[in-house]
Amino acid sequence: MKTRFLLIVVVFAVALVFAACDNGSGGGGGGGCSHNFQWEDTREGVQTEICQNPGCDEKGQTRLTLEVGDTGPSGGFIFYANPNGFTMDSVPPAEAGAVDRSGFPVQPAVVYFFLEASPIDLPIATAWAGGADMANVIGTSTGLFSGMENTWIIFLSTTGNNAARSCIGFVLLDISGELIDDWFLPSKDELDLMYQYLHLNGFGNFINHRYWSSSRGITGAWQQNFATGAQSDAVEGAFPVRPVRAF
């Protein structure tokens, strides 16, 4: 069981509604999909239909079809979508299993289809890592799909509360009572996607401030100014943090 350094429970009145549909597959043989997905956001009393024809995965099961800017399962914002699926550089450490390129044990690769930003920042601006802790962080990457591994590298290389550990401890609770707790600190490139595709298009409720990424730089860690879009290698500071997740 992972340690909670920051437990934040935000209750969103969100319900996933399954409605029968006719998508041309007939619903009979051939492994056709026979359901349509709707997302009901009762916080505003507005129901938004995500898709008409979600399609099927390789097992003939229905799956959500979302686009960048759509509302995700946590009530957050989709900032990357790939219908063919993708894998993250790593997953949270397992009790036993393979070892990743940083020497940490990992679970078997999981195929994801979307990256979702939390609907809110962490409530407190947070340091990336303090003093000697930052020097201990080695092996993070800047690229897309590296944020999850970066977060666990930071978690296992530091002590005390910091941006990455706060993301691991972040929890959202939906109306069904299901905990969503698989958050991580986005990488430099993932953070930039959030700026380009969410913030610049009026999604995400970001503030015009510098946000931390999980990517270590030369002298500090990479952050991005959401007022200008500029990314820079910052030594330290208490900056806003926006957790993200893959699903």
Image (tube, rainbow, N blue to C red):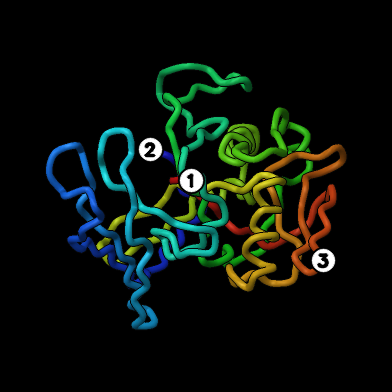
Q: Nearer the viewer, residue 111 or 96?
A: 111
Label 3's element? loop
Q: What is the distance, in whole Å, between disc 3 and disc 1 at their CAs?
A: 26 Å
**Upstream in the sequence, badge 2 or badge 1?**
2
Q: Position of residue 183 (x, y in %)?
A: 50, 49
Q: Residues within 10 Å of mark 3 (few under 14, many from 20)?
A: few
From what the image shows, is residue 149 above or below residue 191? above
**What residue is disc 3 on?**
228
* Amino acid type of the residue that numbered disc 2 sits on in the rendered structure: Met
- Please identify the quarter of the rendering in which residue 16 is found: bottom left
Q: Would residue 3 appear left or right of 221 to someone viewing this image?
A: left
* Amino acid type of the residue that numbered disc 1 sits on in the rendered structure: Ala
**What residue is disc 2 on?**
1
Q: Nearer the viewer, residue 24 or 227?
A: 24
Q: Residues within 10 Å of mark 1 (few under 14, many from 20)?
A: many
- Please identify the quarter of the rendering in which residue 29 is found: top left
- Residue placed furthest toward the right: 219
Residue placed at 64% from the left, 57% from the top? Answer: 194
* Amino acid type of the residue that numbered disc 3 sits on in the rendered structure: Thr
Nearer mark to the viewer, of 2 and 3:
3
Q: Would residue 7 appear left or right of 154 to someone viewing this image?
A: left
From what the image shows, is residue 96 above or below residue 219? above
Q: What is the distance, in whole Å, between disc 2 and disc 3 at their CAs?
A: 40 Å
